[in-house]
Amino acid sequence: MHAIVCIKQVPDTTDVKVNPETGTLIREGVPSIVNPFDTYAIEEALRLREKFGGKVTVISMGPPQAKEALKEAIAMGADEAILLSDRAFAGSDTWATAYTLANAIRKIGDFDIILCGKQAIDGDTGQVGPGIARQLDIEQLTYVFKIQEIDFQAKRIRVERLLEEGREVVETRLPALLTVVKDINQPRYPTIMGIRRATRTEIPVWTAADLPDAKPELLGLKGSPTQVVRVFNPPPRSGQIVMIEGESPQEQAAKLADLLLKEKVI
């Protein structure tokens, strides 16, 4: 069994700054963490390895500082980690990101399952995981909160998906890509031995030159069909408070109803 987990390093703050010229996030100098949803994907991959054997490979695309996120995955128990980092990847939208990660996965070679968090907390699009599946032409199962059954010999998997109006049980063939929700498990804490191993681990860095099948014109900002036209802060909300007087709640309610009708709210 070979599980590949795609993770992202995201800003550990709600005060996100955007480059007004490129429309991309400014990550330099901002404290960062592993995308919280991705930790559930790492945990599920580790549980599969504990049950079936094999290995877990974690990959990420980002600036050099993203090595810290990969080291955290190693500390949790992942076997290998790879960072995709190159100026050519800068400014990638979800399509270009999925394209780059898919090319890296092809280079890694045989795999049985790919796991991703359902979305990243900085972009909240939920598009990269399905985009990778589309690029690799494999099945995708999104919003998975339980793997009911998986048979790596028969190449079959059955999962439960968490939907807005209930749950859905879906079965498909392997290899497949799963995006998972936080209900699927409880991520483990890194152990002391894991932290020591992560400290000693040298994370290999792949650049665009290491992905010979990737077309340069499809990488980074140049290969992103989504372009940010303008970035701006919304104007602050304005309004006023009206105190409704009355000798009884009934009188106040009647005055409130008259006011709402006058303002055409109802």
Image (cartoon, rainbow, N blue to C red):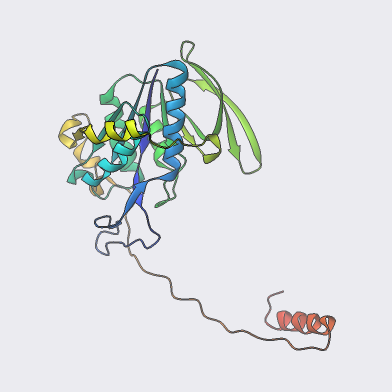
Lateral position of residue 150 relative to residue 193, left or right: right
Q: Residue furthest top?
A: 153
Q: Position of residue 102 (x, y in %)?
A: 32, 32
Residue at 30% x, 28% y is 105
Front residue of this view, candidates 128 and 189: 189
Residue 174 visible, this orientation: no
Q: Residue furthest left?
A: 209
Q: Position of residue 60 (x, y in %)?
A: 30, 38
Q: Position of residue 154 (x, y in %)?
A: 49, 11
Q: Is residue 11 above or below residue 80?
A: below
Question: Residue 216 falls in which quadrant of the image?
Answer: top left
Q: Residue furthest front?
A: 192
The N terminus - image quarter: top left
Question: Residue 200 falls in which quadrant of the image?
Answer: top left
Front residue of this view, candidates 30 and 221: 30
Lateral position of residue 106 relative to residue 257, left or right: left
Residue at 69% x, 78% y is 264
Question: Residue 112 falls in which quadrant of the image?
Answer: top left
Front residue of this view, candidates 55 and 200: 200
Q: Is residue 34 above or below residue 133?
A: below
Residue at 19% x, 42% y is 86
Residue 259 visible, this orientation: yes
